[in-house]
Amino acid sequence: MTKAKIGIVTVSDRASAGVYDDISGKAIIETLNDYLTSEWEPVYEVIPDEQDVIEATLIKMADELDCSLIVTTGGTGPAKRDVTPEATEAVCDRMMPGFGELMRAESLKFVPTAILSRQTAGLRGDSLIVNLPGKPKSIRECLDAVFPAIPYCIDLMEGPYLECNEDVMKPFRPKKK
């Protein structure tokens, strides 16, 4: 079985200032460790909120480092510097709007400001790119909502088979006839 490579990209103003105390990226790794029983390798970057840097990082992870899944955190709000969705859309071949719709719907159960979030997802080659919010609590809530579809999406893209701890995360895969 092929070990999955999963890109984790933290987009942060603090990275521009040389500060890398990244709790959001670590929250993604912790969550994926809870979900996944199959072997996986994190490909981890902390980068500044600059669209060209975000685009270059996503392209490198998808095209050169063969990450089947790339998860970003940060840069999805309404502030002028929040450009992660624009970078994602610029590098993707096809967009997957259902991911953002579901994450906002889930977040609205907890905070009315979820409507300000602009998370999205898309496909670049053999990679699924998913934008998450920046707060660890919101990261878990959003991943809990969308992750059941991610292993099957990766299957359809002929990527590595992601096995999950079904006591924690039950992925949806259609029953074979």
Image: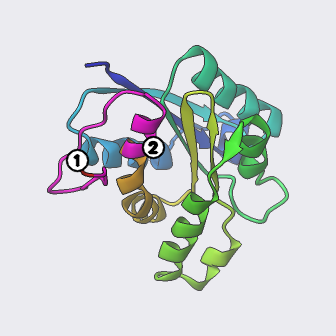
Q: Amino acid at mark 2?
A: Cys
Q: Residue at x 62, y 52 (%)?
A: 96
Residue with the mark numbered 1: 177
- Position of the N terminus by quadrant: top left
Q: In the figure, residue 123 lies in which quadrant? A: top right
Q: Residues within 10 Å of mark 1 (few under 14, many from 20)?
A: few
**112 lies left or right of 174:** right
The front one of 103 and 78 is 103
Magenta residues span 152-174
Asked if the stretch drawn in magenta spans residue 153, the answer is: yes
Q: Amino acid at mark 1?
A: Lys
Mark found first going from the N terminus, 1 or 2: 2
Q: Residue at x 71, y 46 (%)?
A: 13
Asked if the stretch drawn in magenta spans residue 3, the answer is: no
Q: x%, y% of residue 27?
A: 40, 49
- Residue 17: in sight, yes or no? no
Q: In the figure, residue 141 lies in which quadrant? A: bottom left
Q: Residue at x 37, y 41 (%)?
A: 29
Residue with the mark numbered 2: 153
Q: x%, y% of residue 66?
A: 52, 19
The front one of 102 and 74 is 102
Q: Residue at x 32, y 21 (%)?
A: 3
Picture disc at residue 116: none
Q: Residues within 10 Å of mark 2 (few under 14, many from 20)?
A: some
